[in-house]
Image: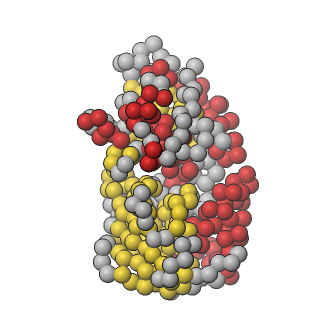
Amino acid sequence: MAYRMAAVAMATPSSFSIRAERSSALDLSSNCATSNARSMRNLVFVVNPRGANGRTGKEWKKLLPYLRTRLGDQYNVCEYITSGPSHAEDLTREAIRDGADAVISVGGDGTLHEVVNGFFWEGHSVGLDFGRRLSTALGLIPLGTGSDFARTFGWKNDPYEAIERIVRGFKSRIDVGVITGENGNQHYFINVADIHLSAKAGYFASKYKRFGNLCYVLGALRAFIGHNNQDLKIKFNGGEWEVFQKVTALCIGNAKFFGGGMKITPTAHPSSGELEVVILQDFKWYDFVFKLHKLYKGSHLSEKTVYSRSVKSIEVMEVTPTGETYVQSDGEHFGFLPTSFSILPGAIEFFC
C-alpha cells in the first residue's frame, strides 16, 4: 500500500523555506509501493478527500486498486493525501523537486488550482530550482463539485476515462494565467479569474459547498445583497487606461467555464496564448434571471451590455477606490482591486 504522506507544516509564501520544506517531507520514492522504484516513472496523485462533501475521498478509495492494476506495470503510483487548505501546493512542489514525472490532481477545481500553484515558486517554475530543469507533467482526475476546467475539453466526471488519458500518455502544453496584487504578490490560475459580483458570489458559494452545485445559486443570491455596479479603469496590453461604467462582473478566462457549468468566456482555450476578457455592464438581478440560459450556452457575447476581447495582459482598478471589489481565481478568493493579470503561454505540459 502506498504510504500516505504526513502533513507538511503550512506557512505563508513570505516565510516559506525551501530547505525547511524539503526536510519536512519524505523522499518521494518512499511513498511509492514497488520493488522496482528506481527503474519506473513516478506518478504522484494529490488527493483532496474532503472534495465534493467527501465524495472525492470515497471515490478515490474505490478507484485506487484499479489505478494500480491499470498503471502498475508502467509507473510507481504515489498517493499524497491533503490535510487542509493550500497543502496540495506544498505536496506538488515536493513531488516536482523529487523528480516526479507527473502530478495528477484528484478532486475539483480548487484542488487543481492549488496543484497548479505548486508548479511555481516566487515567480518562476519550481522545475528550475537547484540549477536543474525538471519536466513534470500535470494530470487531472475530475472528482469535484464543479470540475469546470474539465468541461473546456468536453470531459465528464469519469475517473476511468481520466485514467485512460494518462495511460495513452498524450500531452500538450497549456497556458497559465498570472494574477498580481497591489503588493506585488503573484498567484496562478488555470481556469477563470473574475472580479466584482461573480467573484463575490464565488466567495460566498465556498461557504455553501455542502449543498453541492446548489452552492453556486446560494452564493449568487447572497452576493446580490447590497450589490452596486462599479465604474472601473482598465488597461489592456499595457495601453491607455479606459473607463468602463457600471461594471457588474469582469471575467478573465484561460478556459471557458466557471460557476458549475456557466460558459462565461466561450472563446477562451488554455492553448491559445491569450486570455479572453468578458465584461458584463449594468446588469440587474432580473437580467440574470432572463439571460441565465445565454450565460450557460455562451451566447451572451451578442448582448449590447457585454464587452469581450482577447488580451495578453489586463490591469483593473476602481475609478473611486473602495477596497471592496472582490477578486477571485479558479473559485478561490484572492483579495480586492487593484489587480493585474497576464498569461504564461505553454507553461505546463498536460495530459490530454
Residue 267 can be seen in this image: no
24 to 238, vertically: above or below: above
235 to 115, vertically: above or below: below
At x 64%, y 51%, the residue is: 145
Residue 339 appears left or right of 196: left
Q: Position of residue 129 (x, y in %)?
A: 31, 38
Q: Position of residue 6 (x, y in %)?
A: 56, 28
Q: Which of these two is toward me, 16 or 90?
A: 16
**Which quarter of the image is occupied by the C terminus?**
top left
**Which quarter of the image is occupied by the N terminus?**
top right
Question: Residue extending furthest top?
Answer: 35
Question: Residue extending furthest front?
Answer: 15
At x 71%, y 69%, the residue is: 222
At x 67%, y 47%, the residue is: 52
Count the labels in the image. Answer: 0
State the scheme by which the image is colored: secondary structure
254 to 14, vertically: above or below: below
Residue 64 appears left or right of 193: right
Q: Which of these two is toward me, 17 or 22?
A: 17
Residue 189 can be seen in this image: yes
Q: Position of residue 209 (x, y in %)?
A: 69, 54
Q: Which of these two is toward me, 132 or 287?
A: 132
Question: Residue extending furthest left?
Answer: 131
At x 42%, y 57%, the residue is: 185
Q: Position of residue 224 (x, y in %)?
A: 68, 75
